[in-house]
Image (spheres, helix red, strand yellow):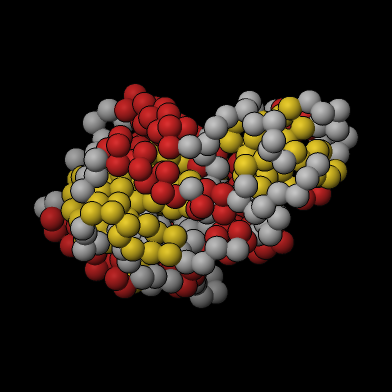
Amino acid sequence: MDSLPTVLLKPGEADRVVAGHPWIYQSSILRLTQPARDGELVQVKDHRQRLLGVGFYNSKSKIHVRLLAPERVTVDEAFFEQRIRAALKVRETHLPEATCFRVVNAESDFLSGLIVDKYEDVLVLQTSSLGMDQRKPMVVAALQKIFAPRALVERNDISSRKFEGLPDANGVIAGEFDGKLAVKLNGLQFEVDLLGGQKTGLYLDQHVNYQRVADLIARIPKAQVLDCFTFLGGFALHAARAGAAHVHGIDQSEQAVATAARNAAANGLSEPCSFEAANVFDWLKAQTATKRHEKVVPRFDCIVLDPPSFTRHRAAVPDALRGYKEIHLRALKLLKPNGTLATFCCSHHVDAAMFQEVILAAAFDARRILRRVETYSQSPTIRSSRSLRKRGI
């Protein structure tokens, strides 16, 4: 381990690493003690030569080092097996009945650049860093040993790979599988396409939140629900099962909307559900358009806003915030007094405080007062989200 190339940090840059931040940027590096190959394991020390950890190096990325451990470790198949088993134990503790869940969530499980999702007996793998991608055979071997899956699918078509100098790579890398699968989520059946669908097939990070929002809706008699960015009907189907009188799901993808309708039928929920292929921004704008001296008539007891990320980089944050304010302002106009707004953010560069500020600004413009009743996070790891209930004034 002493022969590893050493990355020395500039004075003052070590505090962030010691506090637990797993990324080291180019601007934080003082020098390398010897040349390091891209993807190679390196050790990181502060300017006084104190060890801070080891991680994967990539000179082509703005993130020059992705830390894996604060101590010296050997990164081999046994390392990945130990880390994945530790991550699995967390899921089994918090989601004991689940057959579909995110097994590994990158930095949250001390495996920067690695995502592993479990869909029944099929695993989906994503590697977003060069060092992790180079060790994909080790990861696959560890996954096969732990899960013995029917198939293992690679969904490496994410934009972050380009920043690491990695090409797209999709397909079945172990076993036999045609891509289509019926899975269970909180007792509901969903049809997923693991080879051609969005993300890795479903929004597994919302697993717990689907049911928590449904529990809120169950308290509302004859609830009228609007599910924006419904995708495959995750929130919509849970709301319908909870007793909503009617749920309307909207998504820009015609394919997703068609699948959501089939999912509703498969669960015997077609009657209370309707789905529409439309741009959510345009739909909300049309529904809140009024002539002079007219007022918008609130129609919904609960509105769910679960959009995709509005920004991939920090420079686009102002535009993203305008987009978030727009959909919240128009949603609040359609929400009945004492209605429930369940709203989520998955934009990395928009933190919880920023997101809340945008929501409150929209509420001010809509002349509404909000009461926060619950705060949600990623299942079962952390992501900033908000669920707010509106009180009429």
Q: Residue at x 65, y 35 (%)?
A: 54
Where is residue 33 shown, x and y percent of the image? 81, 41
Quadrant in which the N terminus is drawn: top right
Count of marks overlaid on the render? 0
Q: Residue sitting at 53 percent across and 58 percent down?
A: 309
Asked if residue 110 shows in the view, the reply is yes
Q: Using residue 128 as the reference point, say whether residue 358 is left or right of it.
A: right
Name the one closer to the observer, 53 or 205: 53
Q: Is residue 236 left or right of residue 55?
A: left
- Residue 321: image x %, image y %? 64, 57
Outermost residue on the bottom side: it is 291
Task: Using the rendered image of the protein, determine whether residue 219 is visible from the camera's viewpoint.
Answer: no
Which of these two is toward me, 314 or 105? Answer: 105
**Dividing the picture into quarters, in which one does residue 94 lie?**
top left
Q: Residue 97, percent across and down?
A: 24, 31
Q: Is 208 or 247 nearer to us in this picture? A: 208
Tell me: residue 158, above or below residue 148: below
Q: Which residue sits at x=25%, y=58%?
A: 192
Image-based side of 125 in relation to 119, left or right: right
Q: Relative to 24, say whether 167 is above or below.
A: below
Identify which residue is drawn at 56% across, 49% down.
131
Question: Percent x, y for residue 222?
Answer: 24, 46
* Residue lying farthest to the front in this orientation: 3
Question: Quarter of the image holding residue 72?
Answer: top right
